[in-house]
Image: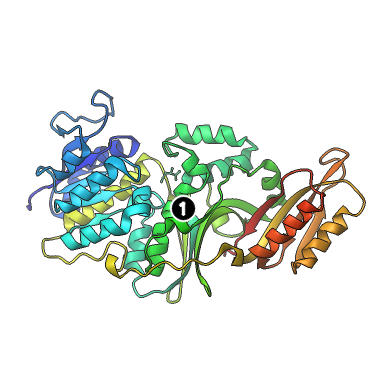
């Protein structure tokens, strides 16, 4: 039997404790699968006294994750600290430079420093594995990097944040408020330490930026993502979407266009009959469209201790199976130094259908004026509905428009014209419609 692979875990929160538990409970099976035992030899976390339901008695405890990263008592540094700077970044960099393999679930760190860290890993000939960083337990990184070699991707999109999907699902199914659903997501351990990262779309953007790099062979460009979260989505939008045959999902979309690569995160209407519309609760899904394979959709648990631990343990097992001298594939599918610069497509050029909900003064001619502004901007309407009298009281009415394919620039201009015309009582709501099978 080969020598044990020695693991150091930094961060013993929901995910870290689950990883330690799985490595202990599944030790026999993992040894058979990997041909060698996997042993946690050292950990680092803030609170030594906290009861995590695991016995840490025989495991070395280091207060500083950077010391753990450099320790000779480990072969693999598992980073579950979180954050794009500070201890997480320093420790991962230190571990790679010291020739340790790294496994991380830290999407924020990879979105910001992934390419630089990949360069160190590739230079040192060690693995930097990050399956858990995108879509929780779904093996999308391995799928895109390994199983889809040779495919040219045209679009990758998905539900990449369990918290948002959980909130939208419960708002729709149970008519609950946004706040009540968010509280439950936090209680269940899905949300980030700062949940605004979930609900304002940053977490989805971090994950999308990694998928974009894998899909298109470009440098990670998380700062170039168009971003809108779900905090403005109301029951009125959810009900109107349902009436029109749509469901609202927070999607991350990366798409090749004539002018560059579009990266966008926003609430999206998808047809209720589409497969992605059936993805409920904390479940994530990633759809990948390619020239050879066609369309692939992966779905599974996107957040929570065990789902994320499953991906982390899979990454550790890959390292346990690797052998010295084995040439590891590059971290982002192509050598980090050969990733192309990211060419951004302007959001104003985005083409697609739009849902527009307007709360207007109930006055003669408003309906016609709204339709006129759409026509003036070259927007063809699929439907325009004024909700029945009494919906909003006597002096205001709701008008709901669905457009045929048009551009972001045209919609922005038309909505701006309507606002300036003085017809609106409230802020307009604009939600993009995404083509989905
Ligand atoms: N907060 C994240 C989510 C956790 O809700 O999906 C997994 O990255």
Residue 38 can be seen in this image = no
Residue 16 can be seen in this image = yes
Give the SS element for disc 1. helix
**Residue 162 vs residue 347, the one in the foreground:** 347
Give above or below for 111 relative to 257.
Answer: above
Q: Which residue in the structure is indicated by mark 1?
A: 205
Residue at the spot 24% in from the left edge and 66% down from the top edge: 329
Give above or below for 118 relative to 429.
Answer: below
**Residue 388 vs residue 348, the one in the foreground:** 348
Residue at the spot 63% in from the left edge and 38% down from the top edge: 174
Indicate left or right for 384 with 29 as reference: right
- Residue 11, position as x, y percentages in the image: 28, 37
- Residue 74, position as x, y percentages in the image: 13, 45
- Residue 96, position as x, y percentages in the image: 19, 52
Give above or below for 385 relative to 6.
Answer: below
Q: How crowded is mark 1: few (under 14 residues within 10 Å), some or many (20 or more)?
A: many
Q: In this view, which residue lies farthest toward the top?
A: 49
Question: Could you tell me which quadrant the C terminus lies in?
Answer: bottom right
Quarter of the rendering containing residue 391: top right
């Amino acid at each position: 039997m080969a020598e044990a692979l020695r693991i150091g875990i930094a961060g013993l929160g929901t995910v870290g404790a689950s990883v330690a538990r799985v490595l202990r409970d599944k030790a026999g099976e993992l040894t058979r699968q990997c041909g060698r035992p996997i042993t946690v030899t050292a950990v680092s976390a803030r609170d030594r006294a906290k009861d995590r339901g695991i016995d840490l008695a025989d495991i070395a405890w280091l207060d500083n994750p950077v010391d753990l990263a450099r320790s000779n008592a480990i072969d693999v540094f598992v980073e579950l600290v979180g954050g794009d700077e500070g201890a997480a970044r320093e420790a991962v960099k230190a571990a790679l430079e010291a020739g340790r393999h790294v496994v991380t679930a830290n999407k924020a760190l990879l979105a910001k420093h992934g390419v630089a860290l990949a360069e160190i890993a590739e230079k040192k000939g060690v693995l930097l594995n990050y399956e858990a960083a995108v879509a929780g337990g779904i093996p999308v990184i391995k799928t895109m990097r390994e199983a889809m070699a040779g495919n040219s991707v045209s679009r990758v999109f998905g539900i990449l944040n369990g918290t948002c999907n959980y909130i939208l699902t419960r708002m729709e199914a149970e008519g609950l408020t946004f706040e009540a659903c968010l509280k439950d997501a936090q209680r269940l351990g899905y949300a980030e330490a700062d949940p605004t990262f979930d609900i304002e779309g940053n977490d989805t953007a971090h994950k999308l930026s990694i998928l974009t790099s894998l899909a298109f062979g470009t440098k990670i460009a998380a700062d170039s993502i168009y971003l809108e979260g779900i905090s403005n989505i109301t029951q009125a939008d959810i009900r109107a979407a349902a009436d029109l045959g749509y469901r609202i999902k927070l999607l991350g979309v990366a798409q090749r266009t004539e002018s560059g690569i579009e990266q966008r995160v926003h609430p999206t209407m998808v047809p209720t009959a589409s497969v992605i519309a059936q993805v409920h609760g904390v479940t994530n899904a990633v759809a990948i469209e390619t020239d050879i394979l066609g369309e692939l959709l992966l779905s599974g648990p996107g957040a929570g201790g065990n789902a994320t631990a499953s991906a982390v343990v899979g990454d550790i097992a890959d390292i346990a199976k690797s052998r010295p001298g084995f040439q590891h594939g590059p971290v982002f599918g192509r050598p980090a130094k050969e990733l192309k610069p990211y060419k951004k497509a302007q959001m104003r050029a985005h083409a697609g259908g739009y849902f527009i909900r307007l709360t207007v003064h109930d006055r003669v001619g408003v309906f016609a004026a709204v339709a006129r502004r759409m026509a003036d901007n070259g927007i063809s309407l699929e439907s325009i509905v004024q909700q029945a009298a009494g919906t909003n009281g006597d002096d205001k009415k709701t008008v709901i428009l669905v457009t045929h394919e048009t551009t972001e620039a045209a919609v922005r201009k038309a909505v701006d014209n309507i606002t300036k015309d003085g017809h609106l009582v409230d802020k307009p709501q604009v939600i993009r419609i995404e083509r989905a099978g």
